[in-house]
Image (cartoon, grey):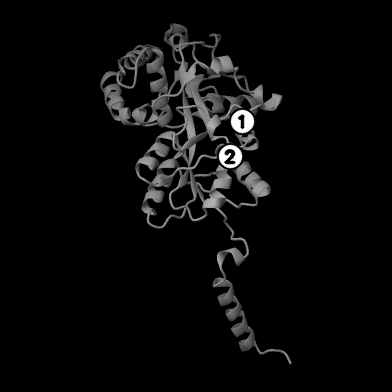
Amino acid sequence: MRPTLPRLLKAGAFAALALATLPLAGRPAAAADAICYNCPPEWADWGSMLKAIKADTGIDVPQDNKNSGQSLTQIIAEKASPVADVAYLGVTFGIKAKDAGVTQPYEPKGFADIPDGLKDKDGNWFTIHSGTLGLFVNKDALGGAPVPACWADLLKPEYKGLVGYLDPTSAFVGYVGAVAVNGAMGGSLDDFKPGIEYFKKLQANQPIVPKQTSYARVVSGEIPILFDYDFNAYRARYSDMGHFEFVIPCEGSVVVPYVMTMVKGAPHPEAAKKVLDYVLSDKGQAMWAKAYLRPARDIKLPPEVASRFLPAADYARAKPVDYAKMETAQKAFSEAYLNAVK
């Protein structure tokens, strides 16, 4: 005899209740096996990375479109009952997360290969890839001027109207550019006078100073030379297939790390560790390189990928800085810039 509808409903409710009370290990795999804050599919090709993690480890990590500031704010708000297992952050936010007490030390496989200055010594945050600040050049838009080789070149009259940099008082990449120029001109994070003097001189060449990311304006030729990251220039050259070049100025520049951290009290700690191991693995590091980001570890890349980057001798001119000090110096620099340059 067939069971009646009420009996079926009752049985279904009982089965659901029984499933809900099973120990976690006995349940079917959850939709998400680990939560990463700020893993957006369109940035750094996280979309491909998350698919690879799923395919190779079986761990499902959903996409997440928060930025670094939003991620840190939420992690702090959830401190008593964490939701995220790991987070991907700009380096200054990684340092702030440690200072806020919302990280836990973990040294993934490959941690020892990350250069000093690009990781917390205890593993509270560590670089997975980096960008280098330099000159993103649209060669077709130079109007006959040569590709500049140095920061000092941009002060020459032939570059009048050709140079752009993001407003260093409102855009992080703009501030990174100011730190790079200042260091190249002999300044330090305690002394921004050389950088301020450089920007004052650059005003004679009528620079273009937007407040927001200007990738499209370089590609279109509206801004022929922009202070920007290497990965944007490589993307333009190899994905948009234009006559673009990236220059690490002869006087030197800075490296900007992107880091990951394990959240203190992560709900899925073992899955979190596997995710962090994966992004630092040889395969994971090679995937970042395919997205035009410099791997944190010095791994052997496929020749077709390695050839997209400038030679190691050029990158030797780009150095890490004290990123915590860089963050605390930003307000004073902004005030000095606004008083002297604008």
Give the residue at x 55% y 39%. Answer: 43
Within 10 Å of disc 2 (Cα), the crowding (few <14, some 14-19, many 20+) is: many
The alpha-carbon separation of the residues under discs 2 and 1 comes to 12 Å
Q: Position of residue 262 (x, y in %)?
A: 48, 45
Labels 2 & 1 near each other (Cβ < 8 A): no
Report the disc number at residue 142: none
Answer with left or right where residue 76 lies relative to residue 144.
left
Within 10 Å of disc 1 (Cα), the crowding (few <14, some 14-19, many 20+) is: many
Say which of 84 and 333 sits in front: 84
Answer with left or right where residue 175 lies relative to residue 234.
left
Say which of 198 and 187 sits in front: 187
Secondary-structure class at tag 1: helix
Secondary-structure class at tag 2: helix
Query: The C terminus is located in which quarter?
Result: top left
Q: Position of residue 333 (x, y in %)?
A: 30, 24
Answer with left or right where residue 35 lies relative to residue 322.
right
Furthest residue in direction right, as rendered = 1
- Visible in this render: residue 247? no
Q: Amino acid at mark 1?
A: Ala
Q: Examine the rendered structure and indicate whether residue 320 appears above or below residue 202.
A: below
Which quarter of the picture shows residue 337? top left
Q: Examine the rendered structure and indicate whether residue 38 appears above or below residue 335.
A: below
| Residue picked out by circle 1 | 289
Report the disc number at residue 279: 2
Q: Amino acid at mark 2?
A: Val
